[in-house]
Amino acid sequence: MNNHSTALPIKPFWSRLKGAIFPYLISLLVTFTLASVAHTWQVLAALSELQVILPVSVWLESLVNDWLGLWSTYGIAQALGLLIAFSVSYWVPAARFRWILYGLAGATAMVVILSLLNALLDVTLIAGSRSFFGYTLQLSAGIIGGLVYHRLTCS
């Protein structure tokens, strides 16, 4: 009988992976929520500019409905985009500036997502990103998501 412990190298890998999953999911939730709220806000603000009177209940209902409704497209696209962006960023040797790197990764993911959705569907799916300000809000959601990921993984 062999009493030697033969630890497989998979355990340290799993520990590192497990330590990245929770921060990834939190950063995805933050990114998607901010992007969804910014989208809804932009659309409803445009309606208000047209003198459409929207009670607070419509704003709140729209926020919830958009959050739930956008998840199956925009949320999945963000999940994949952020996964790729954060994975690539992990391998870039930039220890001192890793927080900038993850913020840029989040913004880059959003640029790619919005560009691909627009090219594939031949329509701006995220109406809240049609203006420069709205587009900037979407990129800001990616930046904040990247910073959240950095804070949770590199602290």
Image (tube, grey):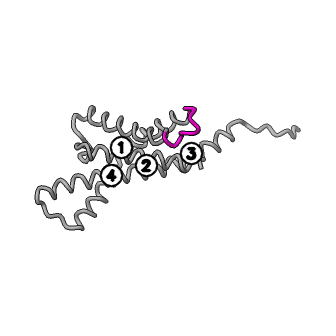
Q: Nearer the viewer, residue 42 or 2?
A: 42
User: In front: mark 1 or mark 4?
Assistant: 1
First of labels 2, 1 by sequence position: 1
User: In front: mark 2 or mark 3?
Assistant: 2
Q: Which residue is mark 2?
A: 144
> Tag 2's secondary structure?
helix
Q: Which residue is mark 1?
A: 139
First of labels 2, 3 by sequence position: 3
Which residue is depicted at the point 38% across and 50% down? 32
Q: Is residue 69 above or below residue 11?
A: below
Which residue is depicted at the point 40% across and 40% down? 107
First of labels 3, 4 by sequence position: 3
User: In front: mark 4 or mark 2?
Assistant: 2
Q: Which residue is mark 4?
A: 36
Give yes or no for residue 53 being in the magenta stretch: no
Which residue is depicted at the point 31% across and 59% down? 64
Under mark 4, the amino acid is Ser
> Tag 4's secondary structure?
helix
Counting from the top left corner in percent of width and height, residue 129 is at 26, 44
- Is most of the magenta stretch helix, strand or loop? helix
Give the CA distance from mark 4 to mark 2.
14 Å
Label for residue 20?
A: 3
Give yes or no for residue 96 being in the magenta stretch: yes
Counting from the top left corner in percent of width and height, residue 72 is at 35, 47
Question: Which quadrant: the N terminus?
Answer: top right
Give the CA distance from mark 2 to mark 3.
17 Å
105 displayed left or right of 61? right
